[in-house]
Image: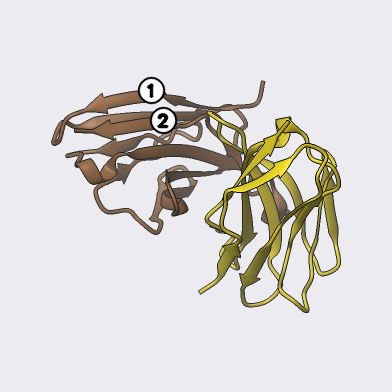
Chain colours: A brown, B yellow
Amino acid sequence: EAQVTQNPRYLITVTGKKLTVTCSQNMNHEYMSWYRQDPGLGLRQIYYSMNVEVTDKGDVPEGYKVSRKEKRNFPLILESPSPNQTSLYFCASRSLSTSGRYNEQFFGPGTRLTVL
Amino acid sequence: GDSVTQMEGPVTLSEEAFLTINCTYTATGYPSLFWYVQYPGEGLQLLLKATKADDKGSNKGFEATYRKETTSFHLEKGSVQVSDSAVYFCALMDSNYQLIWGAGTKLIIKP
């Protein structure tokens, strides 16, 4: 089954304790992205990657890191989480074929993070 | 920069009512337009899309027409069901192939 998986689904942590949210896709997609979703603010992009070893900042990258060492994985790293990073996080992927402008973006189920 | 504006929610309707969720956009050129839906506790999934002016996207009884003259892509359904309760996001793909998202509209359907 084609899917994007994220782990963990729920996480409660404390300020300053480094954490990683994993994201994996099995569709051989070139493009992967991380978003955060907050009430009234919709989806805001954190980082994205067009291919292995290529990453770029989105709209709200501060306090986050990513890496793209393999095509299927795109982990999100919070080196020193703070309460304002409490949010619902989504990973997504899509193909960048020659008609990639119109390719559907697939989302993971989300990770609800609470930073105390 | 490019932007998408959606009507604020929540939108509350009775079952079998007619639905319209407004979406307007600002963009250079003629971007592809999308509606995504997020059911409770799930990630977003593509509902429909339109890639050029006057295109009509449709799926699951929902429709949206790409209106260049009014820069709009309103979502409509003739008769909603309780199972349509979800958050609906309008989006466009900009010239850098990035998706620009609206804030989302929560739809509540009462039996």
Q: Secondary structure at mark 2?
A: strand
**Image mark 1: chain:** A
Q: Quadrant of residue B87?
A: top right
Question: A12 left or right of A43?
Answer: left
Q: Quadrant of residue B66?
A: bottom right
Residue at the farthest left position: A16
Residue, disc 2: A111
In the rendered image, the quadrant that contains the C terminus of chain A is: top left
Which residue is rendered at x = 25% and y = 30% of the image? A19
Regarding residue A98, the answer to whether it shows in the image is no
Which residue is rendered at x = 57% and y = 48% of the image? B10
Question: A72 left or right of B56?
Answer: left
Where is residue A101 drawn, in percent x and y? 68, 56
Residue, disc 1: A8
User: Does the CB distance between marks 1 and 2 fall below 8 Å?
Assistant: yes
Question: What's under tag 1, amino acid-wise?
Answer: Pro
The disc, 1 or 2, on the residue closer to the chain's N-terminal end is 1
Callout 1 and callout 2 share a chain: yes
**Image mark 2: chain:** A
Give the vertical position of B73 relative to A48 (above or below).
Answer: below
Where is residue B40 drawn, in percent x and y? 57, 31
In the rendered image, the quadrant that contains the N terminus of chain A is: top right
Q: Secondary structure at mark 1?
A: loop
Mark 2, Cα crowd under 10 Å, few <14 / some 14-19 / many 20+, is many
